[in-house]
Image (cartoon, rainbow, N blue to C red):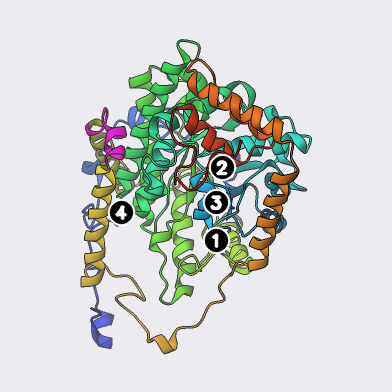
Amino acid sequence: MEKTLKTDERFFEKASRHVTWSNIPVREKYGPDDVKGLTYKEDINDPGSFPYTRGIFPDMYRGRLWSMRELCGYGSPAATNQRLKYLIGEGESALNVIGDLPTQYGIDSDHPCAEGEVGLEGVPVDSVRDMEIMIEGINLEATSFNLSNYLSPFMALYLAAAERKGSEISKLRGTFLNDTLVYILTLYYPNTVLPFEIGRRMTVDTIIYCLEHVPRYYTITQGSEGLRESGATAAQEIAFDFCIARYWLNAILERGEGRIRIEDIAPRFGFTHRVGIDIFEEACKFRAARRLWAKMLKEEFGTTDRRSCTYKVHTPTLGSQLQRPQVINNIVRIAYQTLAAVLGGVQSIHTMGYDEPVALPTEETHRLALRTQQILCYETGVVNVADPLGGSYYVESLTDELYKQMKTIMDEYKYTIADQILNGDLMRLLQNQAYEFQKEVESGERPIVGVNCFTISEEEETGEKAYRIPEQEVDEHLKNLKEFKRTRDQKRVAKSLERLIRAGEDEKENLFEHVLEAARNEATLGEMVGAIRMGYGAPYDPFDEIKYPF
């Protein structure tokens, strides 16, 4: 409940909450005694030097700015293409596309369970033709393209479409989520769309195939939106994801049977970690993460290779901190989040629109989100010095505290992370923490401006223009999908799906090679996911609504 203070009380008001956003206690001042346990060369070092606490490059943003990469996905491939080109025209330096919920679940837009969800929260991509429309007029070989999807058929559709547009897949660059452990954690659908024994092989085989054929792509991007948005602390967010990364590194080395070295695969690991509004905690989180990743690669995998030991991170601003009451206040929140990311030395940023709690961003809010990064970059001077917070007693002490917390969590979950995700224990932990957080908000212990303090009446709230998906966009997309399925070479599609099913039955085959062949031959996303399931003896449709069409 909001407490009303008189003017004289406000004048003498003191800071009353002496913890970080993750409830780490902080003191009123810090000095040399707080960092006496640290060794500069071993724990901090110069930017660009192991363990990379201060940054992965010696000159950081003087040498290369972070990429500005807004998330984009609208009611049809054509609408998404239009928005991508709009963002490029406004100065975006890299692209970032997310599929709608049916696409994330691996079903086609004409599936009975997709009704009402097509194009609602992302772009519907069913076929290579959809992908061609989405990338029309974009120079893919000159553009870093992030594919925010966990299923390898989505990546296959992108590669097949790029080939049709004249690109060599060996020259493509970007990032792909491709993590079926995080997929289970993020979409809260364990063992339904892809039972994990299927998903595990699909993830690993995609990475191995792309090491040779798409070498410039980061073909696994660790980072679960479900972690931080669902209640994880700053330390848990990094530690849990690094545990998952460790799991995949070992799985790939095992699958490679001596043909693949850690120096081959570790450089292709990227990360997506959120950035919140607690400026110092977030900046220190990224500093601690760099140290932890470098030391893990050295101590557990025996490499000091620079490309392997550097933590490369894309950073969306934390949506759960954005509020619907007084929604325009989110402009300020997002600016502080973005500042924290830059002070933390990240490589890529997605600033959310201030209308994130309401709807997909309009052109205006998308532009403002991009301008937030551009003003920070070109007007504030924060890019001039590598790790400008480095050397602060408080910053070095908090970085070390976060590092120790992360290390403790990683040791605890070293051998159990997959089990903890699959049995639901990890999500239950996060849900309990989210509940405790909400109790702090509702009691007023944790002030949130506009929510439990400095509130206004509903009558004073200004209505914000919300983006709505035009129904005709979705109708046209469904019409195009029906026509695509009717006019393609049915025999060629059927043969490629049969080969994909047989590949699933043969552990010696690289599964992604056959997924890509099916995408080239115009199998749809849902058909490819269904065929992969059949190769493992599972029913074609994860929701038991439709039959195998061939």
Res 231 label: 4
| First-in-chain label (3 vs 4) | 3
Q: Residue at x 52, y 67 (%)?
A: 359
Task: Say what secondary structure mark 3 lies in.
Answer: loop
Q: CA distance from mark 2 to mark 3?
A: 9 Å
Q: CA distance from mark 3 to mark 4?
A: 33 Å
Q: Residues within 10 Å of mark 1 (few under 14, many from 20)?
A: many
The residue stretch that appears in magenta:
412-423
Res 11 label: none
| Residue designated by label 2 | 526
| Residue designated by label 3 | 111
Q: Amino acid at mark 1?
A: Leu
**Is residue 39 positioned above or below 190 on the image?**
above
Looking at the image, do the residues carrying marks 3 and 1 touch, with CB atoms under 8 Å apart?
no
Q: Residues within 10 Å of mark 3 (few under 14, many from 20)?
A: some
The x and y percentages for residue 467 are: 58, 69
Q: Is residue 546 left or right of residue 469?
A: left
Q: Residues within 10 Å of mark 2 (few under 14, many from 20)?
A: many
| First-in-chain label (4 vs 2) | 4
The x and y percentages for residue 254 are: 41, 17
